[in-house]
Image (cartoon, helix red, strand yellow):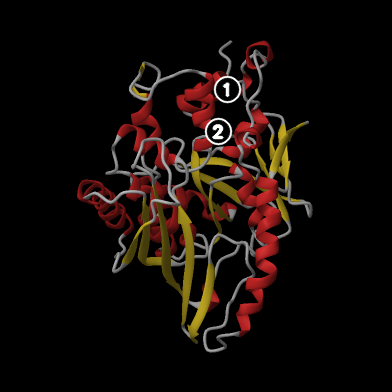
Amino acid sequence: MKNTVMDAPKTNRQKGSKTTYKATGVDTAQEELGMEKVAEWVTQTFSFCPSAPVKLPIGYFANVLQVSPDIGIAISTDGVGTKILIAEQLERFDTIGIDCVAMNVNDVLCVGARPISMVDYIAVQKLTPKFLQEVGVGLREGARQAGISIPAGEIAQIPEMIRGVRDGAGFDLVGTCIGVVHPKKINTGFEVKPGDVVIGLPSSGVHSNGLTLARRSLLTQGGMKLDQFVPDLGRTLGEELLEPTRIYVKQILQIIDSRINIKALVHITSDGFMNLARVDAEVGFTLDAVPEPPPIFKLIQDTGHISAEEMYTVFNLGIGFCLVVSPQDVDRTLKLLQESGEQPCLLGKATDDDEKAVLLAKQKIAGVGHRFVRF
């Protein structure tokens, strides 16, 4: 019987030292603690502008400012992470802007908002017109896919601060996106009930999370090269890792505009399926039909000797976005998604669980908080 990617024999997975996200220098537990410390202070700013009250606590995918009885402005910010280092090594910058747009608009979608605009911040070690031209190409394409404008931005030349993998090539790319939503239609998952169905939309690969662990596994431990053709991928490793993050705006807005009652919208980024637990409702989730992940994840796992628990904690594993709907709305939702060109899959259901655990039954792992563990 064929093993699945997450069921590789333990004897294979345990050869050599196991790689973890924390071992690469990315400590998500400390990041969460740090965010709490910052939040203690920035939450105090909520009263500074009473004409545009903040509608949500800090910590969801985006927040919303109410600027009139009928208009809420959703806002979120994010960057591309160390996927940038892959672009630097390959000297290819025409897709990284798509990632920047995607990471922002997908988060704004999660509060039920329609993304409308984004501004970008580009910090560079050394400015060259060719580099900016290529970044601009990607930003434009991401904006086209999302149906948003990019009316402004900032370029900072800070050679003392920015360092890359090649001399003079260091840069960072960050965006801030806004969207619009009626204050009474803000979606934080508070309506999710046990028995509601989770529908997953495929990712295009690694997207823009977990690249530090992927690079450690593939390039450092595995000794692979970015220009190396990988038969299982059907292209070079670099092309696979630079595949842009998918943008789900048009598909999701079609469902919202159809007036289907979407109970929750969840961007699957760092923490993987644990992002489902961010919904307001006191529910857990049992996912018993998670599909086989794309080949890139098997390559990362096997090369780095990474446990299934760590893989599901760090990566999207082939599902980039989730919707939660009532059982009676499943067929209509699937039909609309398929008509938009999507390949949706039924992943599982919400459960009655005030601990908000996410159970992956087939993989025999469960998550509470920010990590998956084996049971």
Give the mark nearest the N terminus, 2 or 1: 2
Residue 163, compared with residue 263, is above or below; it is above
Distance CA(mark 2)–CA(mark 1):
9 Å
Quick check: marks 2 and 1 in contact, CB under 8 Å? yes
Q: Position of residue 285 (x, y in %)?
A: 68, 46
Residue at image position (64%, 17%) is 13
Which quadrant of the view contains residue 343?
top left
Q: Residue at x 24, y 47 (%)?
A: 134
The quadrant in which residue 362 appears is: top right
Q: Tell me: 191 left or right of 101.
A: right
* Residue under label 1: 304
Q: Pick whichever, 141 or 259, lies toward us.
A: 141
For mark 2, does the 10 Å Cα neighbourhood hold few (<14), some (14 to 19), or many (20 or more) residues? Answer: many
- Mark 1, residues whose alpha carbon is within 10 Å: few (<14), some, or many (≥20)? many
Q: Position of residue 54 (x, y in %)?
A: 58, 78
Residue at the extreme front of the image, as rendered: 160
